Image (spheres, grey):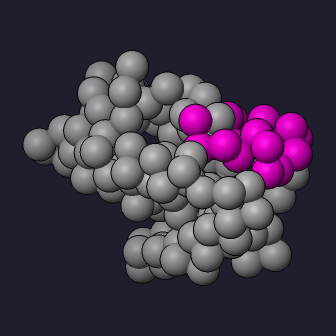
Amino acid sequence: MSSPPKLQRIVELFAGAPKDLRVEALLEYSRKLPPLPPHLQGNRAAMEQVEECQTPFFLSTEVDDERRVHLWFDCPPESPTTRGFASILAEGLEGATVDEVLDVPNDFYTQMGLAEAISSLRLRGMSAILGHLKRQVRAHAVA
């Protein structure tokens, strides 16, 4: 299993950074989360809630005719670590192929050194986000 090139670059940047800078980088990513497209703004019913997250977290994915993945996340600014993780996924996986997304290691965030920087409860939430995302992509790919 491997990550798409954009996500792999992010993983390597985090892995090479000191622990305190990893947290700062995650917080910086939280400020970069792309806004929802008009059809999803204020429409959480059209998104899937990730119940395993401590914070209200919603996601939506689409697969286009070229089997490229497009994804959106709704996460409050008051949850910067979760929002930062969502932003990393958005930057690293947007436009990747279905196979590239499904091949992302389920625990890729451990390669980033995040297990040393954030709580295990947050890590479980991150794992759940990726699991829900992959399940949605898989369902779109089969449809």
Query: Does the stretch in magenta take in 118?
Result: yes
Q: Where is residue 130? Give x, y as percent.
A: 57, 38
Which secondary structure class fits the magenta region best? Answer: helix
Judge from the rendering whether residue 31 lies leftward or rightward of residue 1; answer left or right.
right
Residue drawn at 27 percent across, 27 percent down: 99
Camera sees residue 14:
yes
| Magenta span | 111-128
Of residue 49 and residue 3, the one placed in the foreground of this image is 3
Identify whether 122 is placed above or below 45. above
Quarter holding residue 98: top left
Identify whether 72 is placed above or below 105. below
Q: Where is residue 128? Give x, y as percent.
A: 68, 35
Query: Does the stretch in magenta take in 132?
Result: no
Judge from the rendering whether residue 27 lies leftward or rightward of residue 135; answer left or right.
right
Camera sees residue 89:
no
Identify whether 30 is placed above or below 97. below
Residue drawn at 52 percent across, 77 percent down: 32
Q: Where is residue 19? Give x, y as percent.
A: 73, 55
Of residue 140 and residue 35, the one placed in the foreground of this image is 35
Judge from the rendering whether residue 127 lies leftward or rightward of residue 136; answer left or right.
right
Q: Quadrant of the N terminus?
A: top left
Residue drawn at 23 percent across, 38 percent down: 97
Of residue 97 and residue 116, the one placed in the foreground of this image is 116
Q: Where is residue 65? Give x, y as percent.
A: 13, 44
Q: Quadrant of the C terminus?
A: top left
Of residue 103 and residue 128, the one placed in the foreground of this image is 103
